[in-house]
Image (cartoon, rainbow, N blue to C red):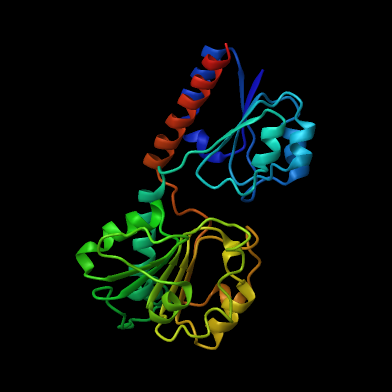
Amino acid sequence: MKIISTCKRTSSNLVEFKKLSKELNFDYIEVFPENQGFTSNKMIEILADATICIVGDDIIDKKVIDSSKQLKYIIKWGAGTDQIDVEYADTKNIAVANTPNILGKYVAEFVLGLIISSLRKITQNHINMQSGLWDKTVGESLYGKTIGFYGFGDISKNVTKLLEPFDCEILYTDMINQNVENAKYLNFDSLIKLSEVIIIAAPLTVDTNGVFNEKSLKNADNLQLLINVSRGELINEYDIFNMFETKKIELLALDVFEKEPPVLDREILYDKNILFTSHNASNTIKANDDVNNVIIKKIRDYIQEKQ
């Protein structure tokens, strides 16, 4: 029997996973993609004789599930299961689990860094220094900014905590009004119109796919900085880059993309007012330890339950 991991972040705790596999009499194998995740066809090959798999942003569709005759348990490293056909897995008696409400505080640290670096033009100033330019770049202060959150889950709640010393006005839109203290619930259009900084931190669904586009942002009269740390598909990249070039959006910070890794025009890629990162917002040693320890417990509990 085999436990196969396709999420590179399990490698941080390889010793613990090897110990677990020995304890359970399983083989433990790590196979990692060069890009963000494996395709469906590649996963068919990798999971051919797997009993348990730990996946990152890999495609687990009906074809993969039908071909994986030994598969009994899928664990998503992280929270988002939009790449897994959970309902179909259930019809095949394959259990699916994820690791929610762990990474929010680590992503929040990253988001705060993106906000400050973007507004204060830290990266731009650094690039100028590398070019031999002693430039007194003028930035914007975070203090007193109006911050809008699209999606108010674990990430957004943790960012809000970090923003407390900056005396920001907190706005959010979500499926429901969560009656959050010191945060104002608005509809999507009002959030767009009033926010100076917008942080996209919502799951990918049929309703959220492509929701940030030229039409939806036409009334973004105060918007200075747009940040996406959820899924790339929530924004229409063509529209967003076009709006950036026409100065409708002043600053961008993108950790996720429609296609990963993205194919970006050189002019966009090297624009000093855009921060690009490689779907890496939660990636810290502590975050890896936290998630991997939860996954190890989930596997142990699952095997014990089945014995």
Where does residue 283 sit, x and y in percent of width and height? 44, 47
Quarter holding residue 63: top right
Q: How many marks?
A: 0
* Residue shown at the point (50%, 20%) measured from the top left: 300
> Between residues 233 and 189, which one lies in front from this camera angle?
189
> Between residues 280 and 235, which one lies in front from this camera angle?
235
> Between residues 32 and 129, which one lies in front from this camera angle?
32
> Between residues 306 and 56, which one lies in front from this camera angle?
306
Q: Is residue 87 left or right of residue 282?
A: right
Q: Is residue 290 left or right of residue 73?
A: left
* Residue shown at the point (24%, 76%) measured from the top left: 144
Q: Is residue 245 above or below residue 9?
A: below
Q: Is residue 119 above or below residue 263?
A: below
Answer yes or no: is residue 48 visible. Answer: yes
Answer yes or no: is residue 267 visible. Answer: no
Q: Quadrant of the N terminus?
A: top right
Where does residue 204 sit, x and y in percent of width and height? 58, 57
Q: Is residue 40 above or below residue 200?
A: above
Where does residue 270 sit, x and y in percent of width and height? 54, 74
Quarter holding residue 62: top right
Where does residue 213 sit, x and y in percent of width and height? 58, 76
